[in-house]
Image (cartoon, grey):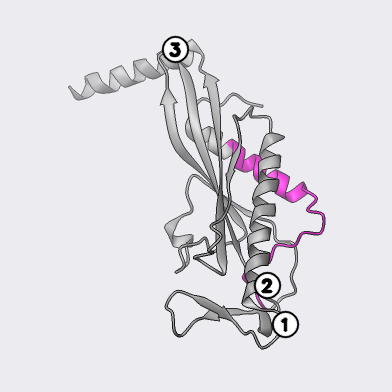
Amino acid sequence: METLFDATSVIHAICNYLETAFQQYKWSGFLFKTTDSTAEAKLATPRVYPLVCPPDEINDSGFPVCVPSVTVMLSSSTLSTVGEMSLRIELHTALVSPSVADAEKAVPDPEHEGKYVIDENTEYTRENAQRELYQSCIVFTSRIARILRASPFSLGDISITPPEPSLPDFPFITSRIDTSYAQVLPKAVCTETETDINTFINEWL
């Protein structure tokens, strides 16, 4: 694995690793539903967004257009006096609960703006859909955490923040993974960086 000397290269390396893992990972029959309600439910390879989900790819509900997905973001970056680069990294997941059957479709609630309802004239109720979506999100996030733990990046402790039980954005849902990355930069890199900065400053004085 190549040496990573800046925050963006670390983020992109993690994203490339996740994309490769998603293509090869055995999901044990766990199916991710997509926003295409006309097709049969099938395994949808999660989309990986590096650094930020572009605003043009966010829907009216504030979620990525492509779901399932995970956005790998930089939370903070620290460069110590001894040249250690420390990063805090957040991974935000996004899932949706559409349906392949009319009876299961979540549609806008005419009485509550921004809320959705499911036709409860069938056995598949809104309660069933919400519980299934919540469980799917926990499974999805937990598996991403295990994939990260198996990565070659020597990441710090990996913690999971589960989705909100109230499901405020139903039929969408999100959760978060937090981890860290640290590396002592070679003196040559630190010196080169300081020289470049000093040169830049002197040119503008």
Give the crowd class for mark 1: few <14, some 14-19, many >=20 residues within 10 Å.
few
According to the image, label 3 marks what residue? 82
Secondary element type, mark 1:
loop
The three-letter code of the residue at mark 3 reads: Val
- Looking at the image, residue 66 lies above or below residue 51: below
Q: Earlier in the sequence, mark 2 or mark 1?
A: 1
- Looking at the image, residue 65 lies above or below residue 112: above
Residue at x 47% of width, y 66% of height: 59
Q: Where does the image place residue 77, in percent across and percent down from the top left?
A: 43, 30
Decide if residue 192 is in sight here: yes
Residue at x 29% of width, y 18% of height: 199
State yes or no: discs 1 and 3 in contact (Cβ < 8 Å): no
The three-letter code of the residue at mark 2 reads: Asn
Q: Where does the image place residue 10, in percent across and percent down from the top left?
A: 55, 33
Q: Distance between the Cα atoms at labels 2 and 3? A: 54 Å
Query: Outermost residue toward the left?
Result: 205
**Can you tell which mark lies on residue 128?**
2
- Looking at the image, residue 124 lies above or below residue 168: below
State yes or no: discs 2 and 1 in contact (Cβ < 8 Å): yes
**Can you tell which mark lies on residue 123?**
1
Q: Earlier in the sequence, mark 2 or mark 3?
A: 3
Q: Quadrant of residue 198?
A: top left
Between marks 1 and 3 in the image, the one whose residue lies nearer the viewer:
1
Q: Distance between the Cα atoms at labels 2 and 1? A: 9 Å
| Closer-to-camera residue (111/3) | 111
Q: Which residues are magenta?
A: 13-37
